[in-house]
Amino acid sequence: MSMPSEVIQTIKEILELSKEDSEVSDIDALNEKILGQLGYPTSVPFVVDRNQRIDLAMTAITRGAKVSEIVELLTWKDFEGFVAGILSENSYKCVESFRRRGDSEIHGMEIDVVGVRGKTIIAVDAKMWGVRGGKASALKTAAEKQKIRTEELSSELDRLHKKLNSLGSGTYSIFPVIVTWLVEDIEFHEGVPVVPVFKLNNFIHELDFFEDMVVSFTGQMVL
């Protein structure tokens, strides 16, 4: 069995090779061996689809890779899937790109990831931002927008139920969250937590602790 460091390095190379073009056309003997151990194709060329890229990223993290190093190798769409994967690992049922079409009477709305567990709903805005100027201002603006979207989600639970087919009747608590790797610790803007992706798992486990600090909205589901 290969060393964890060798597995991580191979995954990083495959993520890099498949980032722009999903096809991988060249791998060395060590990578071929490790990919075989992980259950992936070993004869080139082969295609690494989005779900496989997310699985590889999650595997690297569980083997000890730094989240920041792996996130750098993801696309923005991979990043959404990565966030959804962390929620799913914590027993949340997820919908990505939850949309409401706009018309003459109501504006459109999209939430990157919505996770439901029991009567708790987490609405995530996944911001794959690198180091940038004006961080505080950008996060404040993003928090304000996510707060509005989450409040609007509270009246869209019937549509969410159709997507997941798992919402029961009752009252739901809905929390807005921004997930990024731009920050080093959990911050709050307008009552909206801004969570570094490498702390998302801990935040989910400790949501009860943060509940008094996080703005939330109530939604009713009647079946």
Image (spheres, grey):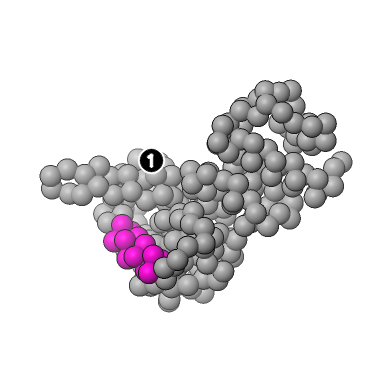
> The disc labelled 1 sits on which kind of residue?
Lys
The structure residue drawn at horizontal position 74% and vertical position 51%, both measured from the top left corner, is 63
Quarter of image, res 159: top left
Please, is residue 84 above or below residue 196 in the view? above
Judge whether residue 11 can be spotted in this image.
Answer: yes
**Horizontal relation, residue 62 to residue 185: left or right:** right
Q: Position of residue 167 (x, y in %)?
A: 39, 48
Check the image and name the residue furthest to the bottom.
212
The structure residue drawn at horizontal position 71% and vertical position 23%, both measured from the top left corner, is 44
Check the image and name the residue furthest to the right.
1
The structure residue drawn at horizontal position 75% and vertical position 34%, both measured from the top left corner, is 35
Q: Position of residue 205 (x, y in %)?
A: 57, 65
- 21 in magenta: no
Secondary structure category for the residue under label 1: helix
Q: Which residue is mark 1?
A: 163
Please, is residue 28 above or below residue 57 in the view? above
Residues shaded magenta: 137-150
Check the image and name the residue furthest to the front.
133
Q: Position of residue 69 (x, y in %)?
A: 65, 54
Quarter of image, res 119: bottom left
Quarter of image, res 139: bottom left
- 148 in magenta: yes
Q: Position of residue 64 (x, y in %)?
A: 73, 55
Please, is residue 223 above or below residue 144 in the view? above
**Which quarter of the rendered picture does the N terminus lie within?**
top right
**Horizontal relation, residue 128 to residue 32: left or right:** left
